Image (cartoon, grey):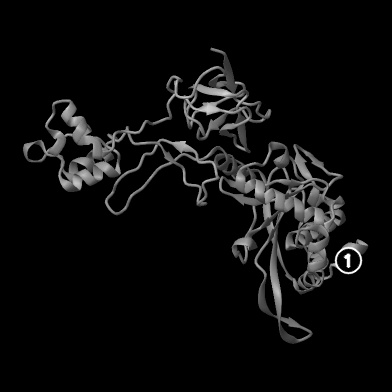
Amino acid sequence: MAIVEVKVPQLSESVAEATMLTWKKKAGEAVAVDEILIEIETDKVVLEVPAPAAGVLAEIVQGDGATVVAEQLIAKIDTEGKAGAAAPAAAAAPAAAAAPAAAVAVAAAATGGSKADVAMPAAAKLLADNNLSVSAVAGTGKDGRVTKGDVLGAVAAGAAKSVAASAIPTGVPTKSLPQVSAPSSAQNLGDRPEQRVPMSRLRARVAERLLQSQSTNAILTTFNEVNMAPVMDMRKKFQDAFTKEHGVKIGFMSFFVKAAVHALKKYPVLNASVDGNDIVYHGYFDIGIAVGSPRGLVVPILRNADQMSFAEIEKKIAEFGKKAAEGKLGIEEMTGGTFSISNGGTFGSMMSTPIINPPQSAILGVHATKDRAVVENGQIVIRPMNYLAMSYDHRIIDGREAVLGLVAMKDALEDPSRLLFDI
């Protein structure tokens, strides 16, 4: 027997632990070299763990949902083994599946008991719903029969320790996304069921950073409205030629990125950050693009956005969106950033107050573009309007810079030619 160890890959310096997701192979199954065995979730990214050698997965040392650290042993591969001959997993998932209610009669009969037929029909259904064995519930009915009340009491009292591990819902119905398994603490409350599941590492990290931002920054938000007709007309005029030339469509986000960089150049404090009692002015423009993913909010970075063309921005944003949906974003793609843009308009938001992504000092929120009645030259006309919101850290950014910065973005969007001449 030639054993090759499978270990947790190296994590970033800021990540101490990670969570095992779901094994794609079972002990005893054949694996190919570089075949993905499991995905491991950190508070920033999901890392794939490939098989270091071909053979048979001889042993799973750390099961689904386990907390692990860098270089920790999680499995063993027998390079000379045969499929089906491996030992069972050494570390099970947090909760092992109990025998379903349908098998209760067989289990009871095997132990010589008489509980094969002692569960009332309603109780039997509840047993099945909660993956409980009839033998795990004390019956209070006639002749020791298990009633519906007995099952509800057992569940509420925590007797459902053998409930099968259930996947944390991601909210996106797709089989390609990683599912985190965790012990279920479901409570059957009749027609009002509840289920308690732990936060994913990413969700917990997002919550921590948002609270940090709220508690450490003096956040204020300024608003403005922008007529998107010039941008929409330009997109319509050049869309076909642009798509043919670059293989990607012109979206609104490239205009928002360009307009933001345009304003940041005029008002550098919007691109700065606080470090103790110092203000750090960044001589580069790394724009974070907030992207919703099945795992939660992620903010990949457009590096040197001021040097990127419209086509390069659109391609990169499309790449970020695809990677986010598949959980493939790398740590280096989400590290840093000097300013962020959040597009709630994708989901139909009309107005919001975005929260600053620390250590940045400002963030732009864009929303859905809708036809609205506005006044131009004393006349009421219909224009496609978008409400812009910029939250900023009032510790270093005064209202003047914030308002003028947002106006600069508005002017650039209402007259995109300004971006060509940098005016």
How far from the left and from the top, in percent, is residue 386? 69, 69
Task: Kindly identify the residue that appears in the image at 36 percent across and 47 percent down.
Answer: 194
Please say if 172 is above or below 151. Answer: below
How far from the left and from the top, in percent, is residue 242? 82, 63
Q: Is residue 110 visible?
A: yes
Q: Count residues near mark 1 (Cα–Cα under 10 Å), then give few for <14, some for 14-19, many for 20+.
A: some
The foreground one among 382 and 395 is 382
In the picture as drawn, the residue positioned furthest to the right comes out as 421
Q: Is residue 393 visible?
A: no
Query: Three-letter amino acid code at disc 1?
Result: Arg
Quadrant in which the C terminus is drawn: bottom right
The foreground one among 107 and 12 is 107
In the image, taking residue 377 as reference, residue 175 lies left or right, namely: left
How far from the left and from the top, in percent, is residue 376? 76, 82
The residue tagged 1 is 418
Please say if 323 is above or below 61. Answer: below
How far from the left and from the top, in percent, is residue 327? 61, 43
Disc 1 on helix, strand or loop? helix
Q: Quadrant of residue 55?
A: top right
In the image, taking residue 417 as reference, residue 51 lies left or right, namely: left
Number of disc labels? 1
The foreground one among 339 and 394 is 339
Task: Kindly identify the residue that appears in the image at 40 percent across and 42 percent down.
Answer: 196
In the picture as drawn, the residue positioned furthest to the top comes out as 1
Task: Kindly identify the residue that appears in the image at 78 percent across and 54 percent down.
Answer: 313
Q: Quadrant of residue 391?
A: bottom right
